[in-house]
Amino acid sequence: MKKTFYLLLIAFITLGMAHAQSLSQEVIASSGATISGASNTLSFTAGEAVIGDISNGESLGQGFWLGAIEGVVLSNEDFTLEVQTTVYPNPVSDYLNISFKDMAGEAFDISIFDLNGRLVYRKELIDSTSNETLNFSEYTSGLYILNIEQRTTKKSKTFKIIKQ
């Protein structure tokens, strides 16, 4: 009796697997599109399973494809201040010197933030000289962030300043 039961169980499992292998692929989708590039064309429906690899600069392997492979560049503009700026001494105890190379006459905004992100100092340099001195003697010991932003280009440079 047990032998017959196991044989029937194995037969049902085998028939179930054989039937599952014979199912045809079916796509039920509400939308789709065709994308054409310089060297190829791709037609798809939303939710269609991808078999194989799709490549157009980026690659999509097996899985579900829910849209076109597309690289989006939000911005490629560099916001780093290209001016050679020197800040010394660091760590600072009383006075911090900022030296701008070849930028006399430019307009800058100088901001100092504590580690909690609070603005503790701000100064506008309308017609800057090659050097600027900041009084750090009133600040408590710790780490500060110095941000120097050029007004015309909005480019900035950030320094970590240690107050002793």
Image: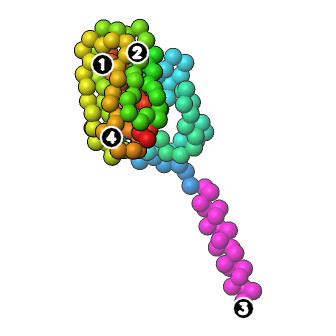
Q: Which residue is labeled 4 in the image?
A: 139
Mark 4 or 2, closer to the camera: 4
Q: Amino acid at mark 4?
A: Tyr
Q: Residue at x 41, y 8 (%)?
A: 102
Q: CA distance from mark 4 to mark 2?
A: 24 Å
Q: Which residue is labeled 1 in the image?
A: 108
Of mark 4 and mark 2, the one earlier in the sequence is: 2
Q: Is residue 74 visible?
A: no
Mark 3 or 1, closer to the camera: 1
Q: Amino acid at mark 2?
A: Phe
Q: Nearer the viewer, residue 53 or 104?
A: 104
Dividing the picture into quadrants, the one containing residue 142 is top left
Of mark 3 and mark 1, the one earlier in the sequence is: 3
Q: CA distance from mark 3 to mark 2?
A: 95 Å
Q: CA distance from mark 1 to mark 2?
A: 10 Å
Dividing the picture into quadrants, the one containing residue 162 is top left
Image coords of residue 29 (percent x, y): 39, 44
The region drawn magenta spans 1-22
Q: Are marks 1 and 2 in contact (CB under 8 Å)?
A: yes
Q: Are marks 3 and 4 in contact (CB under 8 Å)?
A: no
Of mark 3 and mark 4, the one earlier in the sequence is: 3
On residue 100, which mark appears? 2
Image coords of residue 105 (percent x, y): 30, 8
**Dot 1 alpha-carbon crowd within 10 angstroms: few under 14, some 14 to 19, many 20 or more:** many
Of mark 3 and mark 2, the one earlier in the sequence is: 3
Q: Residue at x 45, y 21 (%)?
A: 86
Q: Which residue is labeled 3 in the image?
A: 1
Of mark 1 and mark 4, the one earlier in the sequence is: 1
| Quadrant where the C terminus is found in the figure | top left
Q: Amino acid at mark 1?
A: Phe
Q: Nearer the viewer, residue 31 or 12?
A: 31
